[in-house]
Amino acid sequence: MCRWLAYSGSPLLLEEALYGGANSLIDQSLHSRLGAEPTNGDGFGVGWYGERPTPGVYHSIEPAWNDRNLRELAGHISSPLFFTHIRAAIGSAVQQTNCHPFRHDRWLFMHNGYINEFGTIKRDLVLAVDPSLYPEIQGQADTEVLFFLALTFGLEDDPAAAVEQAIGFVEEVGSRHGVPNPFQGTIATTDGESIWAFRYSSERNSRSLFYTTDVPTLRKLYPEREDLKGFSDNARLIVSEPLGDVAGVWNEVPESSWGVVGPGGEEIRPFRPKTPTTSVPVTT
Amino acid sequence: MCRWLAYSGSPLLLEEALYGGANSLIDQSLHSRLGAEPTNGDGFGVGWYGERPTPGVYHSIEPAWNDRNLRELAGHISSPLFFTHIRAAIGSAVQQTNCHPFRHDRWLFMHNGYINEFGTIKRDLVLAVDPSLYPEIQGQADTEVLFFLALTFGLEDDPAAAVEQAIGFVEEVGSRHGVPNPFQGTIATTDGESIWAFRYSSERNSRSLFYTTDVPTLRKLYPEREDLKGFSDNARLIVSEPLGDVAGVWNEVPESSWGVVGPGGEEIRPFRPKTPTTSVPVTT
Amino acid sequence: MCRWLAYSGSPLLLEEALYGGANSLIDQSLHSRLGAEPTNGDGFGVGWYGERPTPGVYHSIEPAWNDRNLRELAGHISSPLFFTHIRAAIGSAVQQTNCHPFRHDRWLFMHNGYINEFGTIKRDLVLAVDPSLYPEIQGQADTEVLFFLALTFGLEDDPAAAVEQAIGFVEEVGSRHGVPNPFQGTIATTDGESIWAFRYSSERNSRSLFYTTDVPTLRKLYPEREDLKGFSDNARLIVSEPLGDVAGVWNEVPESSWGVVGPGGEEIRPFRPKTPTTSVPVTT
Amino acid sequence: MCRWLAYSGSPLLLEEALYGGANSLIDQSLHSRLGAEPTNGDGFGVGWYGERPTPGVYHSIEPAWNDRNLRELAGHISSPLFFTHIRAAIGSAVQQTNCHPFRHDRWLFMHNGYINEFGTIKRDLVLAVDPSLYPEIQGQADTEVLFFLALTFGLEDDPAAAVEQAIGFVEEVGSRHGVPNPFQGTIATTDGESIWAFRYSSERNSRSLFYTTDVPTLRKLYPEREDLKGFSDNARLIVSEPLGDVAGVWNEVPESSWGVVGPGGEEIRPFRPKTPTTSVPVTT
């Protein structure tokens, strides 16, 4: 399993989100409280928006807790929107091309969870990726294939519908091969402006997902806290596991839901896997 | 481009083949004389037979010239048959899963050269890999796909015919997509007993390939040389580039040829790409 | 903290010692039961005797649990005497030159524990290393300095006396600088024939250390166990933490003791830090 | 040997300096024209000033030409002052703690060249480092020791005088041990505002060093060039080897000289090694 964190708001030094809090993401790399595995030491990744429309991505195969370059970068890069992900590999190799977040043009994508019995259905899934996108697949992680399925199904136009179709397709192929509970997990994706987050599993018992209370409310709750003054009103953290225990800060995303934060507003809606509307190649 | 070396004979400490000679393989990693690129610093690999029928494999993304573990292993592992390969990446990531030699059960496979415009035809090639083998593909190197095509076409039963079909198929798919000169290179494969080596390119202007003169002849040529006494009569090195300049030692494999050395004897034959006899899935 | 394992006996495939048992060393890298820290993911090392008098050494900065090369090497190297060590770094960088076991000529040395406030007393300790040995120091780990102190004090002639002096010297320098409890830990060292193991801490509350019951006794205890037949009578494992729970197998080394196993017999004796007999340079 | 580049001026995306030009620094990592060795593939480093007074530092042991993270960072970090360095190791391990630039508080330091027979005189040099600075030494590179000597001799107060004393001391210790030509190379150091660069060797035959003509002059020379309009008047590159062949751009720093660029103006002066004025500990 893995742990992840997504931030949007006023520009924030990465280290405040990565190393801050009583249960910081970096602490979670050594001993996560809510994860399926306590240790998330099989590499990590950071994706951030800054100088250009296309985000920068930093991937490393070292455990996050002892990567000196991560500490340097986190202490010197600030960004209004970034993703970070720490990995606990299940099966696929520990290599940079398997590290989240994955990128396509302006888009980032990351995931905590798995496609069940991926080896069994991988070929059918990969075959459904748009042939023009196929050569961009760099690694062998289940999440990367899921990302390219979502791109195939229109992620750049309607992210929520595309992820619903990608997961619907995974469930359909899995069911055809007799794979129980084909999908598990939480997902975040962004175009650099809005963040879409998903919580779903075929068994309806999904990995945890939390988001922070809006900053104006937090300022009323904790008028004495100086750290809250530095955040913009629209700042949000979305995380697989709370970074601390402060009352009123962390809200759970309901089972089988997706939400969006961004310039177009915020909302949470039910998540329903769908059959892809695009025709998908079938192996003969 | 890359450089490689294959050895069979009486058990030899790896370092004698890797670090020995006026133009040792490790020297070639820094400044190859005959390679398409002088520097082969994008990782390397060693595969050797020893304790078990399945060979051991060591892959590293560090340049061979400064990898301390390689020096240690080469100084402490001796083997009657081993492959080593130094890589100059063209396109695909520098990661262990892209390092040669590739392995499947008892078989090893390595290559110096490329599949031209691999991104264009990769999907069609991968689709032709036997679905039961497909989940074993670990990386994204063109050579790994070629290896799995050869396995699909019967490498374990008739290596020469299988490689002829694999390359024939690459040329056929390449030609269908308008790719000029689809295949270039030299290949070595082994089951732990015999070594098959191939030299071929669609343009009939192939990367260099050499093998050593048989040891009894060398002993007659150089009766005073002590080092030759340690080798068994059947010892052979096959290399992409000679390790030294000693007259009478290195023989070039002719253009468009393949050869085999092993318990069943030795021979060199013409190489002719063939249309696969197995039916191959076609994308719809 | 760290975890380590030393083996001597009939040649054994490394993987049997590394990956075998209900609580194998590799399992301990993810979740040690007795260690000061549950995760030992900051690199590892293997040292083994084989082809030559000087042992081979393999050091990696990846967590042992996901290092594919380690699995390959462990599955293809067998040795009559080897050390393995998994590291949990405290302070010094995760780099190969800080990985145990350390080597000098035929000798290996590894350690679970620490020199307290090493930064404070490092300069005085390093200054006491024999100037002819000084250039061999490769990294910055406290254990490497301890090893070179022990070499300075005669490790190659009388290992137990040299380690007693090295730790005595650490305590003396520590006390001069007001460092509480300067030394903590267990140590193993070998010349390729005998293994010396040490358990000691300035506070007399030392890291755990165990050794296996002699094989003839184990065979009587478990006449039905096939695995015991493969071991020679003199086979021994010495470990910082038992690899399993089988009754009668694991014996604790008493607090403040050292022991030796080897061709000269076996014994356990009290450990008493000593003032070095060699004169030591003093900073002016 | 190594290659390096220092930039100060209006904020510049790192990739423009690293990947730009007919003979870019990244090209030089594969085939340097003027270096003592054509390949500089033993790791690299970047130090840059940005969000904070203390610079960020990124060190990697992969060859610069294939490090994907470097490309990402260089494409997303812009800075008004940065150092980059590509390494060709001679002796010391390829590890992050041996990568330049080295850092102490706000200062960066990098070097192309070597201390001759470093193993012979290392102990005496290290012993002369101020004991309060000693614990900060992280690696084993000759340059790091030189940096700490310069800090000991007052780098933060008078950089030129401190480097003259550091090299004077190296020559003195070298001469005491019979080491011929103890120092060779070019050095750059900065406090984040000015850059000091040095060219000197004991044999008076020093590694090359170049700086760019001032921007207003270049604009007059090449009124049509758009790229020059983006640079501020005070922008300068200092490099061990020109990045291209454009006439009038590159000026050689004379043998045995040092120069400074910064808010306090620019000048070039003769370099003369000096005996340290600080008293230095002597081994007994």
Image (spheres, coloured by chain):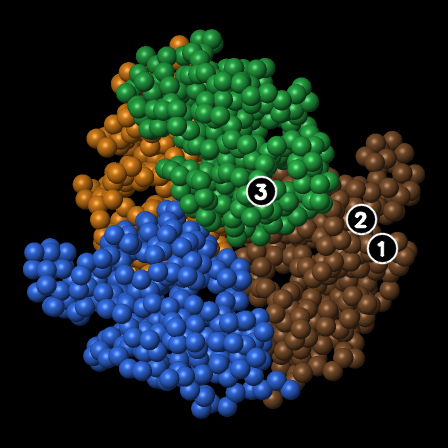
Chain colours: A brown, B blue, C orange, D green
Q: Are marks 3 and 2 in contact (CB under 8 Å)?
A: no
What SS does tag 2 mark? Answer: strand
What x and y, as percent, mark residue D60?
A: 52, 44
- Image-based side of A279 in relation to C229, left or right: right
What SS does tag 3 mark? Answer: loop
Q: Earlier in the sequence, mark 2 or mark 1?
A: 2
> Which amino acid, by three-letter code, is at mark 3?
Val
- Image-based side of D148 in relation to B81, left or right: right
Q: Are marks 2 and 1 in contact (CB under 8 Å)?
A: yes
Of C206 and B242, which appears nearest the observer? B242
> Which amino acid, by three-letter code, is at mark 2?
Ser
- Label 3 crowd bin: few (<14), some (14–19), many (20+), radius 10 Å: few
Question: What is the distance, in whole Å, between disc 3 and disc 2 at their CAs?
Answer: 44 Å
Residue C192 sits in which quadrant? top left
Question: What residue is shown with label 3?
Answer: D246
What x and y, as percent, mark residue C201?
A: 42, 29
Chain ID, mark 1: A
What SS does tag 1 mark? Answer: strand
Which dot marks residue A8?
2
Question: What residue is shown with label 1?
Answer: A261
Question: What is the distance, in whole Å, between disc 2 and disc 1 at their CAs?
Answer: 8 Å
| Marks 3/1 same chain | no
